[in-house]
Amino acid sequence: MELATHTTTTAAEAFDDAAVAVVPTGSVEQHGPALPLGTDLYAATAVAESVADRDDVVLAPPIPVGASGHHRQFHGTLSVTPETFEDYAHDVVASLAEHGVRKAVFANGHGGNTDALTRAARRLRERDVAFATPWNWWSNLEGLEAELFDVDGITHADAMETSMMLHLTEHVREDALEDAEAGAAEGWGEGVHGAPVGFDAIDFSESGAVGHPTKGNAEAGEALFEKATSELGALVDWLGAQSFADLRPEGHR
């Protein structure tokens, strides 16, 4: 069920069958000159919507703005503090728990959200409110990215994100992909003798991109999307099959 489309009456009925909440979390931040600011939001929302027609799932509205302070020097980036984001995500799941759905997945599209989501999940469990798990759409691609692009994992505005946006949206400025790559960094961050010295994207990427966005294509994006949605469906299956009692911390069982 897609929660926002229900009335309070129909939601009450639908919650009777619901076992797992899925909360999409993304960001509105720079993704170089070719990809839309909403790249992370679009990807997380689309993947999460793949389970919206399941009777055992409550799909919450997406949390659009995340912890993106490391992109703040680029125009269009919106950000909240990690603490604000953590509290917001925590409270959304706590609200769902009040209606009886005490198991949740944060379907995330922005790596900068991960630490805050993990803290929110830990608080929910420690306080015996709910069990929530953070899950990034690229978390379990099982080598697909290496097969498609000869890379290990996602970076930022790279071939993987470009491919996902080409598959999901019409917002890619394909004529700017070469400029994005010309000013891109080879990898995320900058270090000296093992110490990080570049904390913001602007410290090491002229265009804001990292990796090789010109290698992206819609066919690869479709393959990534199909793998991500399959993994989310399997995660929801697993979580739905667990009793809440078994997921609670010791001392609350």
Image (cartoon, rainbow, N blue to C red):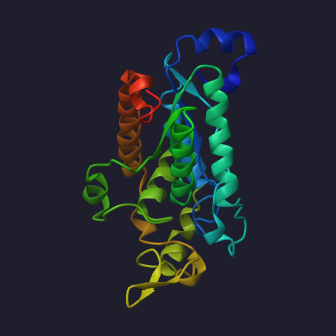
| Quadrant holding the N terminus | top right
| Quadrant holding the C terminus | top left
Q: Specify whether 137 is left or right of 143.
A: right
**As rendered, which of 220 and 96 lies closer to the eye?**
96
Q: Give the residue at x 33% y 47%.
A: 140
Q: Specify whether 110 is left or right of 11.
A: left
Give the vertical position of 176 relative to 165 (above or below): below
Give the vertical position of 140 relative to 176 (above or below): above
Residue at the extreme bottom of the image, as rendered = 193
Image position, residue 83 (x, y; %):
67, 57
Can residue 237 be seen from the camera position used here?
A: yes
Q: Give the residue at x 57% y 74%.
A: 208
Q: Give the residue at x 69% y 61%.
A: 81
**As rendered, which of 170 and 251 lies closer to the eye?**
251
Q: Which image quarter: residue 74? A: bottom right
Give the vertical position of 156 relative to 99 (above or below): below
Residue at the extreme front of the image, as rendered = 251
Give the vertical position of 167 relative to 159 (above or below): above
Q: Specify whether 231 is left or right of 41.
A: left
Can residue 46 be seen from the camera position used here?
A: no
